[in-house]
Image (tube, helix red, strand yellow):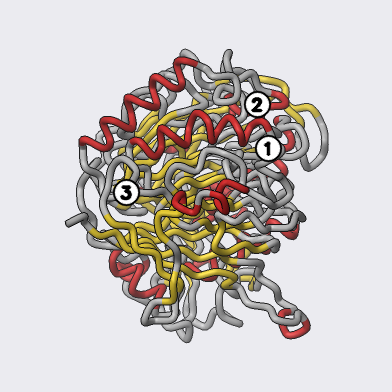
Amino acid sequence: MRAHPCAGLIVAALLLLPHCAVGDTVGAWARNATTQVASRNESVSSPLTVALEEAGDEIPAAAPETALQVHDVSEDPEEEYQLPKTRQREARRGGTQRGLGTRIVDGTRPEGVVSVEGLAHPACGRSNNVVLTPYLQSAGSTRMVVRWRTSGQGAGVVCFGKSPKAMTSVAKEDGKQWPMYAERKDVETWDTVHAADHLVVLEGLDPLATYYYAVGTEVPTQPEYSVRSAKVSIPSSRYYSFTTFPEPGAGVEEPVRVWAIGDSGWGDHKAKRVRDAFVNFTGGDWDLTLGLGDLAYLRGKDWEYQKRFFNYLSEENARVPVFTTPGNHDAFTADMKLQTGPYFDLFTNPGDGRSGGVPSDHKSYYSFDYGPIHFVSVDSDTLGLHDDPALYAWLEKDLAEARRADYQWIVAYHHQPPYSKGSHDSDAQYECYKLRSNLVPMFEKYGVDLVLAGHSHSYERSHLLSGHFGPSGEVRSNPGVVKARWSKGEDGVETLVKTGEGENSGTLYIVSGGGAIRGGGPLDHPAMAFSHKNRGSTLLEFDKDELRIWLLGEHRDDKDDYAGYTVILDEAKVIKKKAR
């Protein structure tokens, strides 16, 4: 969840004793207490009251963080929570903002809500030394996997429900493989800490439903809180929400929004500008994220993932599930055949088939469904490069079943591109040659509509291709490999019409590897209709038989001094038509 425009503004709210005296001990503690209230406005003019948990004979050290609730009592509490997803889309596109635990407003009314008191497991209401903010994995129509990391001991707990006031469902770790303990680097202090990686599976969820959740740890040696009215106060900074996917193959009313970002692995101020451009353009409203590899430079070490992937995307990954594919920098410290190393320790992709598609029973390649869209992730760096027979057998079976199921769209993604003249030349790199020789023919055989890649630190959008398996010169010597070309539509947007589905119907290729680095290269591949060297990421919006594509650049506060600045660097549209 991105912060509100004025979330950095902090005002102090004094605790008023008439509202919070729940016993001599608590009252004595409260007399000298203040709390920080984040507000989107310049001041909090409405009355504030405070609710404190009962804490026994003495206040634990963590009480100021975990046992305190400040809320705005001047408004109807029923207005404090999120609107349904369809209403959220309308509100965001109308220019308003939303925040967890706050209401959607016109920006003129004071906001005082910083936490929600409701029914939940006590472990979810206390501080639990979170090192990595919760992030969502292996999403589906009826399940969600929640991952996070803490320092110290304790079994992971997730409280969840359809209201932040009633996160009454509780899921816990299996106690066998998870939590996974190891010595890790604290990227803030560089001290070595005893860390616990947590994985909790939420199952039996409703399709296309919004859930609120908070994480905690059960520590037997830590005293339990006795909570007033059986309620737990959870600060808004510590609970999140997500929306489950539609059922596999099911139609959807709203357009499906996908963030495709490659080579973001520095996680620095430049990567943050790319992130902010996307979040601001979409209003924070998208359905899933595809990480196109090279998620952590330089060598995919655990501390690099912490500092350069999870930290800068902490709010996004906590509410939108991310699906990843390994790049060459991820593979430096990972064994793709043995499925070991930091990449596999940190990412849980749905190789079990429970998010849709044919089970791969492998962690580096898999597939999943979002309603009418079938997504396929392929390891192009290691297993695809070395002709892994299990990978190819699985891919053929998965694509064949997806084609028989008649999905509206089939999307494949991997790290290396089959065609590029950016910072990597597909005519000169063996990995790209192997893709054109082995994977591209399979994509075309089963009518894959779109192939996404990174690796080249640029953006390249191809014409509709069919049968282009050789070097770039083949496009000139055999122009028939271009199935269809782009042209200006009536709305002025570059438009491509794809007619028919299945074998040799044509495939669109997009390179989106500018998540953190501005690359070089001539960017003159003849198969490409448009190329751009600036940093950026790609927004895909699938709406029945139409796909809209945006390349979004960097958010720049100094844009008035940046000649020719625009956040939209490319806009295009694909229309699918049935063959006559």
Which SS class for mark 2? helix
Q: Residue at x 35, y 23 (%)?
A: 359
- The residue that disc 2 covers is 342
Decide: is 440 above or below 370. Answer: above
Residue 302: x and y, percent? 70, 30
Quadrant location, the C terminus: bottom left
Q: Earlier in the sequence, mark 2 or mark 3?
A: 2
Q: Residue at x 50, y 20 (%)?
A: 178
The kind of residue on which mark 2 rests is Pro
Q: Are marks 2 and 3 in contact (CB under 8 Å)?
A: no
The kind of residue on which mark 1 rests is Tyr
Q: Residue at x 21, y 37 (%)?
A: 405
- 340 on left or right of 441: right
Res. 103 mark: none
Graded by Cα atoms within 10 Å as few (under 14), some (14 to 19) or many (20 or more), the crowding at tag 3 reads many
Residue 55: x and y, percent? 51, 42
The quadrant in which residue 7 appears is: bottom right
Decide: is 417 above or below 281. Answer: above
**Which one is in front, 198 or 207?**
207
**Which one is in front, 311 or 324?**
324
Query: Marks 2/1: CA distance?
Result: 8 Å
The kind of residue on which mark 3 rests is Trp
Which SS class for mark 1? helix
- The residue that disc 3 covers is 409
**Which one is in front, 374 or 124?**
374
Q: Nearer the viewer, mark 2 or mark 3?
A: 3
Residue 518 appears in the picture as rendered = yes
Res. 305 mark: 1
Q: Earlier in the sequence, mark 2 or mark 1?
A: 1
